[in-house]
Amino acid sequence: MAKDPQTPLDEELARQEEEAEPQAQEGELEAAIEGADEAEQAAREAETSDNPEAEVLAARVEELEQSVAEAKDQALRAAAEAQNVRRRAEQEAEKARKFALEKFVRELLPVVDSLEKALEAMGEDATEAHREGVSMTLKMQHDVLGKFGVEVVEPHGEPFDPQYHEAMAMVPNPELEPNTVMEVMQKGYLLNGRLVRPAMVVVSQAAG
């Protein structure tokens, strides 16, 4: 059966239908892509908000981060404490080294006192050789003590200092300021700045 001849109007309608079909397909594709994006985004939101496993993992991560922070803090505290202990040990060792001879020096001081008194007590009848021998021995004693950090405390004419001096008597003296050391009965000694024996002194006081 032969087709009816198409009029110009039929041809125009057919052409418009062919042009409209691809446009409809393109619109459907864009709508599908948009729907897929929206679905993916919704899935991600559901995964972060509604997934119990994700919430558990997030809580576990936070707990581990807190544990790491606490461990770092404890490590820093332990290192600081170890450094303090080491510093105290070094200070104690240095102190022990500096004052290890304290007892020995204290025992040796009476020998020095005896040599000084012997030199002072020598009269005119003592020979020059005898006097020189005692003087040299005393000097050697002082040199050895000085080599090991021993200092003499001889405060004649200085203000009285109870940290280094021991007052044996208070004597009125108008020529001196009150609390001035007017006589040293026995010298004092320091070992590396620490008092080994105080100087025994007579101190002036105001007259009347």
Image: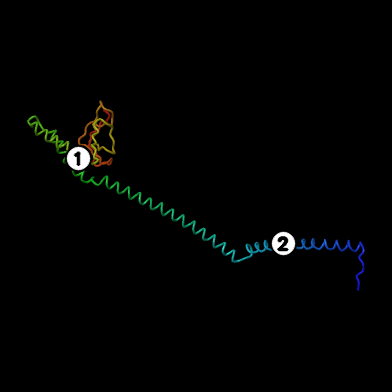
Residue 144, label in figure: 1
Q: As drawn, is 170 to the left or to the right of 135?
A: right
**Residue 204: image x %, image y %?**
25, 31
Quarter location, residue 119: top left
Residue visible at 92% across and 63% down?
Answer: 7
Query: What numbered label is drawn on residue 33?
Result: 2
Residue drawn at the location 56% of the way across and 64% of the way down:
57
Q: Secondary structure at mark 1?
A: helix
Q: Is residue 29 above or below residue 112?
A: below
| Distance CA(mark 1)–CA(mark 2) | 100 Å
Using the rendered view, name the quadrant where residue 37 is placed. bottom right
* Residue 134 visible in the snapshot: yes
Residue 208 in sight from this viewpoint: no
- Could you say whether the residue bearing mark 2 is in a helix, strand or loop? helix
Q: Amino acid at mark 1?
A: Val
In front of the other: label 1 or label 2? 2
For residue 133, the mark is none
Residue 99: x percent and y percent? 26, 45
Task: Point out residue 48 in the picture as x, y percentages from the top left corner.
Answer: 62, 62
Residue 207 found in image quarter: top left
State the colouring used for the structure image. Answer: rainbow
Asked if residue 149 lies left or right of residue 89, the reply is: left
**Which residue: 21% across, 40% down?**
145
